[in-house]
Image (spheres, grey):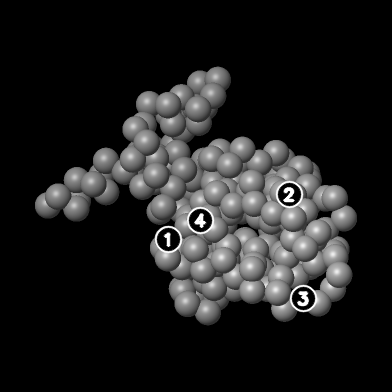
Amino acid sequence: MNIPLLNQLTKKRKRKNSLKNREMFERVMLPHIESAFNLASWLVSNKNDAEDIVQESYLKAFRSFDSYADRNSHAWILTIVRNTSYTWLNSNKRYQLNNEFDEDHIECDNPATQLDMTMKDPYEWQVIQADIQSVHRAIDTLPVKQKEIIILREIEGCSYKELAEILDIAPGTVMSRVSRARQMLLIALKQAPAREKSHEL
C-alpha cells in the first residue's frame, strides 16, 4: 500500500527542508509499512479500516518526524500504529477492549487444555504441528492485548527491547507477557477442534 496523502501534507508544509524531510521519512519509515499494515489488520480485524489506520499513523509520524531523533524506526512506527489502532477500537469496538482477559489469572487446570510441561518447548512443537490456517484462527480468538504480542513477537519478529518500547512496559515484564500470550495461543489451538466441530453441528 502507499500513502498518497503524504504528497498533500508535504505541499502544505512551507518549511524549506520539507522535501528533504519527506525523502528521509520515506527512506526510514516506508520499509516498515507492511509490518504496520499487518499489525493494524490483526488488531481491528478489517483490512479497509487497517489501511485507514496505517495512513493516519504515517501522517502522524510524518508530522512528528522532527522528534524522531534516529530511534528504532521499526518500534517507533509500530508504536504509533498500535496507539492509533487502540483509538479506533475505543471509538468503534469498545467491547473488544472491555472484554480483556486477566493475564494474572490464567486458568490451566482443565485437563483438556493443560500443557505438557515435560516437553522442552511445547509452544514451538504445537505451533509446528498446527496448520497455518488453524494458527491464524486461534490468534484471532485471543483478546487484543495478547493478540498484539503474538503478532509483534512471532510474526513481525520484534525483539524484547522493541516490545518494551512499543507496549510501553518495563523490559523485565516483556518475557512474562510473551509467555502468557503464547500459553493462551496454545490453549486456543487445543480448543480449536472442539470449536470447529460445534460449528459443524
For the residue marked with disc 1, what is the amino acid? Lys
The mark found on residue 47 in the picture is 1
Which residue in the protein does label 2 denote?
A: 28
Image quarter of residue 22: bottom right
Compare marks 1 and 3 and give the one earlier in the sequence. 3
Is residue 84 something that shows in the picture? no
Which residue in the protein does label 4 denote?
A: 1
Which residue in the protein does label 3 denote?
A: 13
Give the CA separation, mark 4 to mark 1. 11 Å
Instruction: Check the image and report above or below for 135 versus 102.
Output: above
Secondary structure type for disc 3: loop
For the residue marked with disc 3, what is the amino acid? Arg
Give the CA separation, mark 1 to mark 3. 30 Å
Q: Which residue corresponds to the image point at 64% horizontal and 67% vertical from the top-left?
A: 6
Compare marks 2 and 1 and give the one earlier in the sequence. 2
Circles 2 and 1: CB distance less than 8 Å?
A: no
Is residue 21 something that shows in the picture? yes
Circles 3 and 2: CB distance less than 8 Å?
A: no
Secondary structure type for disc 1: helix
Give the CA separation, mark 4 to mark 2. 16 Å
Expressed as whole percent of the image width and height from the top left, the position of residue 108 reads 47, 43
Compare marks 4 and 3 and give the one earlier in the sequence. 4
Q: Which residue corresponds to the image point at 45% horizontal and 39% vertical from the top-left?
A: 186
For the residue marked with disc 4, what is the amino acid? Met
Instruction: Check the image and report above or below for 197 versus 102.
Output: above
Expressed as whole percent of the image width and height from the top left, the position of residue 171 reads 78, 46
Compare marks 3 and 2 and give the one earlier in the sequence. 3
Q: Which residue corresponds to the image point at 72% horizontal and 64% vertical from the top-left?
A: 61
Q: Which residue corresponds to the image point at 50% horizontal and 31% vertical from the top-left?
A: 123
Q: Residues within 10 Å of mark 3 (few under 14, many from 20)?
A: few
